[in-house]
Amino acid sequence: MKLEYKILWIDNDDKIYKDHQSIIEEHLIDLGFTPIIEKGTDYQAFDKFESNLEQFDLFLLDYKLDGTQNENEIIKNIRDEHSIYTDVIFYSTLPDEVRQRIYEDKLNGVYYTSRKFDEFEEDVLSIIDVTIKKTQDVNNLRGLIMAEVAELDIIKEEIIDKASKQIDNKVLEKY
């Protein structure tokens, strides 16, 4: 069974999507994940997925979309009203402006990068690696818990075995 890695990617220009989609998908596949990328052309895409935004592992967003509301307010709304703390990557031709606005609005779990080909790709893949590391840590914890449960199952079997030896065969036949 493969784990899915879901990205909500919002940009009204397909060029950056087309330039980087296959690299991101290949990277995720190499890490053992099935990539699922939902594409939107404006921030209304958040409304489309409002009931299950928590399914996404990453929001990848163009910082300046024509005619949209303040990008930071959208993220604040998702965080405050829906309690969704998915990592966000904003990208822009003016990454320093994005960094300053993120800082001023005190947004947590929000990264920024440039639209420049190499910077974009390197930053996005690095952040994906960080989010996957978090998932792998949870999976390791689950493995430890399952190992403990298996030990309890062995103890339970031993108790049942000892108890069954003390019960009359006619009583055991009922079960």
Image (spheres, rainbow, N blue to C red):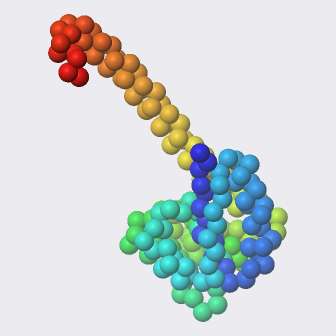
Residue in the picture at 40% in, 21% down = 151
In the rendered image, the quadrant that contains the C terminus is top left
Q: Position of residue 23 (x, y in %)?
A: 78, 61
Which image quadrant for residue 17? bottom right
Q: Position of residue 52 (x, y in %)?
A: 45, 68
Query: Which of these two is toward me, 103 or 109?
Result: 109
Q: Is residue 99 above or below residue 173?
A: below
**125 relative to 103 in the view: left or right:** right
Query: Which of these two is toward me, 22 or 71?
Result: 22
Which image quadrant for residue 10? bottom right
* Numbered label tally: 0
Q: Position of residue 115 (x, y in %)?
A: 76, 73
Q: Is residue 132 above or below residue 162?
A: below
**70 relative to 9 in the view: left or right:** left
Asked whether residue 80 appears in the rendered view, the answer is no
Q: Is residue 118 above or below residue 27?
A: below
The residue lying furthest to the bottom in this view is: 67
Residue in the picture at 66% in, 59% down = 35
In the rendered image, the quadrant that contains the N terminus is top right
Q: Position of residue 121 (x, y in %)?
A: 77, 63
Asked whether residue 15 appears in the rendered view, the answer is yes
Residue in the picture at 77% in, 63% down = 22
Residue in the picture at 70% in, 76% down = 92
